Image (cartoon, grey):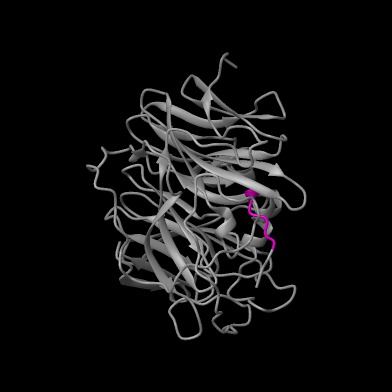
Amino acid sequence: MRRRLCFSALFVVAFSACQTSSLPSTPFPLETTPTAQPVEPTPTIIVTPTVVPSPTFEPSPTPTTATPPIGRPLIQEQAGDLYTIVFSIPVGQKNLIQYQGVDIPEMPITGPNALALLPDETFLIADPIANRLLNFDQTGKLLNQVELSELGIVNVSDVRADEEKLILLEISLDFSPPRYRVNQLSFDGKLLASDDIPEGFGIDKGLTGIAIDCDGSVLLELEGGFRLVRLQDLRDNPADAQTSGYNCGGKFYQIIESGSPEIRAMMAGDVRYETRLTMGSGSLALLKVFRDGSFTVVREDVVEFLPEITVDQTVHYIGADGITQAVARVPLAEMFYPILRSVAVSDKGEGFLLIPRSRSLDVVRLNFYRSLNPLPPSSVVPEVTLSPTLP
């Protein structure tokens, strides 16, 4: 089976929001496919799903380098693979994880759609097909599962976590009017609070996810993270809610207008950063802000439109000194179906990725490098730099 896919957040918002749990639960037969090859820092631009060898619950070896300090990922000095597999979960008829839409013409493939890192360094995966949350340790052992139907929650499209709680974005078009809700859960799955998102802030207005800043405030992500609106402001005065940003360590972090169609820009306090796009299509969004002032952003650059849309997605780490120090590439070409919230960053600054494959669901650790080559060579270098001039 070969599918041509488009992964950019600009193109998958409506698809991600419509992954409801009411779709027919038809399991699919496992496929017999060849073994995948290791990924190189400049992989092929052909967007076709790749299959890994028979999955295992044994963790992959980790680098022998000392544990990096809080807020800073391990940075590789020599070119190598894009990621290291942490664990794999089998997918199929008699397994814990199943997909929908496989081998059904004109029906998009759906399955687990969000990844979050918990304070104890375990992983939380949202499974909208079974309407539950799955908590795994770093060996792939299932520690806990939360049945969301018992809490009155349906179709979670985004999951975030801070030191105290889980935040779930619930989107369901099966209700009239559609349900848009933010739910807060304890780590053991108890419902703490629920807030309906006011009318006018749904997917038709660009709702793509949620975020949590350093003081625990919940933010709605609109337009792929270009706009952030504080949930408390919506509660207090929905008609006058303003675009906001991350508040952390006395600094304000937000995406801003760049003044150029080929540039995306952001502010970290009074410092401006920007990235150049190959053809003017793409985005820049904050992933995580650390208390020491360092932060990570995700950059998406549409590098080709023909023969198919090709997106280069990269994660950039900017240190507490304000200098971009490392970049990792997301292997979009290996994903069996697109996931809008596939990347999560730990408190140590490590980047993790959820990769759905035809026979397994993999959690991998992204490898950070000082720099990466363009993808393809004719595109611009994937980098986020200090702006030469103030806005």
Residue 349, compared with residue 86, is above or below; it is: above
The N terminus sits in image quarter: bottom right
- Name the one closer to the observer, 295 or 253: 295
- Find residue 101 and report its image quarter: bottom right
- Name the one closer to the observer, 307 or 68: 307
- Name the one closer to the observer, 389 or 236: 389
- Name the one closer to the observer, 136 or 61: 61
Kindly identify the residue that appears in the image at 63 percent across and 61 percent down. Answer: 48
- Find residue 333 and report its image quarter: bottom right
Kindly identify the residue that appears in the image at 55 percent across and 79 percent down. Answer: 32
Residues drawn in magenta: 4-9
Q: Position of residue 133 (x, y in %)?
A: 42, 68
Per the picture, the main secondary structure of the magenta-coloured stretch is loop
The C terminus sits in image quarter: top right
Residue 96, compared with residue 300, is above or below; it is: below
Q: Is residue 6 magenta?
A: yes
Q: Is residue 316 left or right of residue 145?
A: right
Is residue 189 among what the camera can see? Answer: no
Q: Position of residue 253 (x, y in %)?
A: 48, 31
Is residue 328 among what the camera can see? Answer: yes
Q: Position of residue 50 (x, y in %)?
A: 55, 64
Residue 128, compared with residue 242, is above or below; it is: below
- Find residue 67 and report its image quarter: top left
Q: Position of residue 207 (x, y in %)?
A: 62, 50
Q: Is residue 345 magenta?
A: no
Furthest residue in direction right, as rendered: 306
Label tally: 0
